[in-house]
Image (spheres, rainbow, N blue to C red):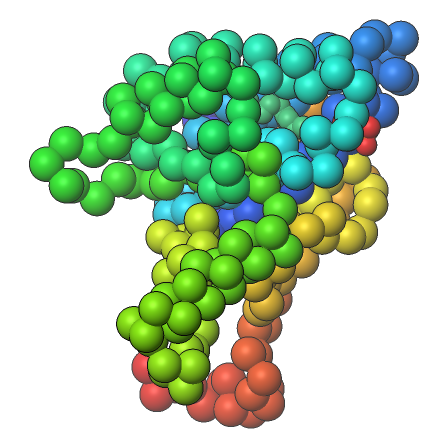
Amino acid sequence: MSAPLPSAKSPPSHVAIIMDGNGRWARERGLVRAEGHAEGARSVREVVRTCREVGVRWLTLYAFSLANWQRPQAEVEALMRLLIRFSEREAVELKERGIAVQVIGDLDELPTATRRAVEHLVASTRPEGGAEPTMTLSLALSYGGRRDILDAMRALAVRVKAGQLLPEELDERWLRAQMSTRELPDVDLLVRTGGEQRLSDFLLLESAYAELYFTPVLWPDFREHHLLEALDTFARRERRFGLTGDQVQQTRVDA
Ligand code: FPP
């Protein structure tokens, strides 16, 4: 009999993950970096399924950042091929599990074959008849948080210039509606593997009140029990959103 999943009682609604450590995992084994990414794709598979099982509603993975374009060409190409393979292999099962895939960032900047494969994955996992998916998996591809904010500001500036919007009408909702993350709620739990403790331009606006969880575990080693540990830590945190501890307790009593 398998033990009950410890965090099933109060899973975060939106989990975002910076999947770091693939290169080091490969180097430790005398392998090329691409093999670290390939093993990392297996962690992706496991973590996606676990999130869905414990009731996470939104999962966002930092699969390829804007800065990653500066990596050696062979590594970029290997990552692009891996995305094709992932898209082709996972589509049917994701659909069966009610997991819809979407993209944040700029899919148009990807090579044509990768873009087409990911577009096909997105289309083939879209629930029929406008139904709600059980979970939405967002892949951040050619994504940068600052760029997303800047692009949104440019789009708003154009509308202001055209007289469609007044500057004083602009608020956070307007800004967020222009961003590639427009469909995502705020991040509840942001996980970074691989031992570094930074955001690396990931979901800067959306993580304003996220709980941060850093682990030294390298991404290819990060499997179900590591994720459950992160969810468990999250469940024990008190989120105050700027309130006092007493106010938070009172809100719970009132609810
Ligand atoms: C960072 O590790 C990881 C990446 C830049 C790529 C992440 C991609 C995957 C996990 C696999 C493909 C994704 C999907 C969705 C199929 P790093 O290479 O910077 O590691 P290092 O810090 O040890 O060098």
Q: Quadrant of the C terminus?
A: bottom left
Figure quadrant of residue 81: top right
Say which of 230 and 73 sits in front.
73
| Residue 126 in sight here | yes
Q: Quadrant of the N terminus?
A: top left
| Residue 229 in sight here | no
Seen from this angle, which residue lies furthest front? 162
Residue 246 pos. (x, y %)? 56, 91
Is 62 on the left or on the right of 68, as rendered?
left
Is 204 on the left or on the right of 166, as rendered?
right
Residue 49 pos. (x, y %)? 44, 29
Figure quadrant of residue 82: top right
Residue at image position (81%, 9%) is: 32
Is 241 situated above or below 98? below
Residue at image position (50%, 37%) is: 106
Is 39 on the left or on the right of 53, as rendered?
right
Is 231 on the left or on the right of 37, as rendered?
left
Residue 45 pos. (x, y %)? 51, 23
In the image, ligand 1 is in what quadrant? top right
Residue at image position (56%, 87%) is: 243
Residue 144 pos. (x, y %)? 62, 46
Q: How many marks?
A: 0
Residue at image position (63%, 55%) is: 146
Is 219 situated above or below 228? above
Is 244 situated above or below 44? below
Say which of 237 and 67 sits in front.
67
Figure quadrant of residue 158: bottom left
Say which of 248 and 183 sits in front.
183
Say which of 80 and 133 sits in front.
80
